[in-house]
Amino acid sequence: MSKKNKSNPQTSAPTPEPAPLPPTGAPALWERPLVASVLLVLAVLATYAASVHNGFVFFDDDKAILYNRALQNPSLSKFFSGQNLGMFAPISWIGYWLGSLISGQEAWGYHLLGLLLHAANAVLAYWVLYRLLERHWPAFFAAALFALHPAQVEAVSWAAALSTVLFAFFYLGSLLAYLGWKKSPTPALYGLSLLAFVLACLSKSAAVTLPLVLLAVDAYRSGKFSGIQWLNKVPYFGFSLLFGAYTFVTRAQEGHDIEAASSAFSLVDRFWMVCQTLLFYPAKLLLPLGFSISYPFVKTEGLWSWEYYLAPLALVALGLLVWKKFASNRDVLLALGLYLLPLVVMLPFRTVGSFELRSDRYVYLSCLGVFLLLALALEHQKASLRYGVLLGAAGLLAFLTLSQTRVWKDGIALFQNCVQKTPEASLCQCNLAYSELLNLDFENSAYHYSQALKFDPSVVEAYNGRGQAYFQLKKIPEALDDFTNAIAGGISTPKLFLNRGKCLVMLSRPQEALSDLNKSLELEPNSPEAYFFRAVVHEKGKEPDLALADYSMAIEQNPNYLEAIVNRALIRVGNQQFAAAIEDYSRAVALNPRMEMIYNNRGYAYLKNGQPDKALADVNTAMELNPNYARAYQTRAVIYQQLGQAALMQADLQTVQRLQQGR
């Protein structure tokens, strides 16, 4: 049997060695994490810089900041013992306080804080994704879109929404610290993560979703759920349940009837609304146009529009696609989790004291998941294509964000935009009318309040606002009707009863007015204007002593109340209390030295008090201020009569006659 030939080492082909991998070298400059962080900060500062010049909008800015008593005399005890707008958010209050330290009663300090926090959040978002994925490209792409997208303008450019960027800062910080703890399990990192989570919850209750995100992160890193993963989340879930439950308590304390508000939509309605909302936000993020502060849920003749009914089918189809194509793709599942989990408490399952069941700021954090999906879709393309898409998208989004920032210039610009986008939104109509009312544009204010009532007659606050506009337009009967409708609708404020009382006084219905003015003072005893008008009612009812007492109360509460001082002086003259009347008129002269009527009246009081020389001086001053003031000539004629100067008396009487005849 022949032996097998051994191969000849000199004639057989050598076994090829594996080809060496091409040298990777150092990453490109812009792919280094620190450089990427700097680029994100610069992009945010350049894009949002104009927002610093915006003002306040009187939609929560007034209640949360300008009229927040805790900020007027700040202290930690006030921040941690009160609640505002139905929310317990002491860390947000501290943020507002810092804004006031920067700019006082001007808005730019709050906008500057929002801008800086958003820049910090963009960096934190990048580092969270970078630590999770351990890849620069998808982390940077998603963080860049997070930084520049116009959907973020509401959270960044609205002073009251500082709570959103603030809670997101601690939320992302807690997540980053948790990732550090998973890599290096030290008590300090775990404690830092838990502390940051508590601070996030103390900034805004929306932070309660973080434990769910932490579970998703653990599943992403390990590929499965385990008992130990749940165990180390127990403190997080404990705080989450605590703050979540307390939110319902503070809402109720604020007067929000959650059950009544939620009953506006049935359970079936809520199903369609939730399904449509889950698709609404990604559509808005992918087609970044038509942003508004309000996206109302509107039914027409009891039916939703077609997209609501198709939304559940679309969600099922997307779910099947993910299950079949991406069930083993952890990156895609992570991105979906980052979209859905932070959003879960923002979905319109119930109405927890807010008119906006959908809002751009609700997706401030969740948008990161959508942007990560886009990044993953582009990740395997050529670098030139990927970065080309990134630069193009960044440029377009920055331009749109600059435009959207101008929408938040002030309340009128904001709600004009809202009315243009969704004219059927009574919330927008009502708040535009309120901004116009504050700007003394009473005609347009009345019109937009009417539009709000046209689309939703249940918005009783619109009756109150339109009544104020009508009152300023001297349409007193119309104002009275609106104030009556507001009271019938359940509004019970001292200002409302005062306003209706004023209308009744002006319509010569003093007895009806008295009931409203008494109610106003019962609700708010420190009201100089209510005392003033009640005094007017007493005067009309021939009760000078009661009128005198109410004028005195008005002056005690407001020592510079000119009308009350003058009216009290008139009553004192009628009561023969000339010295006291002179004292009142002298206070009035100090407040307004250019009003001829006050000098004339004080001159008359001086005359009755036996001081004709001072009387003559005052009347002459009145004539210097207004040479055609007939009453001053009449008063001087009386003075001349008492001084025995008949010729001068006759001359003044002739002047009175000439002025009264218009010659």
Image (cartoon, grey):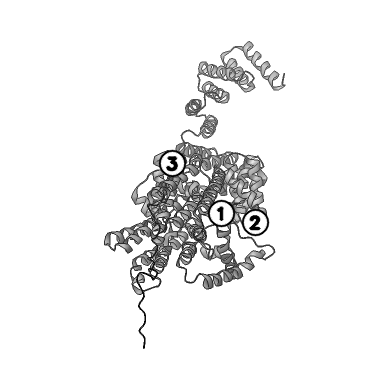
Distance from disc 2 to disc 3, alpha carbons, whole Å, reads 38 Å
> In front of the other: label 2 or label 3?
3
Foreground residue among 160 and 211: 211
Q: Amino acid at mark 1?
A: Ile
Distance from disc 1 to disc 3, alpha carbons, whole Å, reads 34 Å
Q: Is residue 110 above or below residue 612?
A: below
> In front of the other: label 2 or label 1?
2
| Side of 102 relative to 382 (left or right) | left
| Residue that numbered label 3 is attached to | 109
| Residue that numbered label 1 is attached to | 491
Residue 297 coordinates in the image, percent (x, y): 61, 60
Look at 52% across and 48% down and name the residue there: 391
Q: Quadrant of the N terminus?
A: bottom left
- Dot 1 falls on a residue whose secondary structure is loop
Q: Is mark 1 in CB contact (under 8 Å) with mark 3?
A: no
Q: Amino acid at mark 3?
A: Gly
Q: Do we see residue 511 in this rendering?
A: no
State the mark number for residue 88: none
| Residue that numbered label 2 is attached to | 457
Residue 334 coordinates in the image, percent (x, y): 45, 65
Count residues near mark 3 (Cα–Cα under 10 Å), then give few for <14, some for 14-19, many for 20+.
Answer: many
Residue 411 coordinates in the image, percent (x, y): 56, 44
Count residues near mark 2 (Cα–Cα under 10 Å), then give few for <14, some for 14-19, many for 20+.
Answer: some
- Dot 2 falls on a residue whose secondary structure is loop
Q: Is residue 488 above or below residue 395?
A: below
- Dot 3 falls on a residue whose secondary structure is helix
Distance from disc 2 to disc 1, alpha carbons, whole Å, reads 14 Å
| Side of 137 relative to 651 (left or right) | left
Look at 46% across and 43% down and name the residue there: 45
Q: Is mark 2 in CB contact (under 8 Å) with mark 1?
A: no
Q: Amino acid at mark 2?
A: Pro
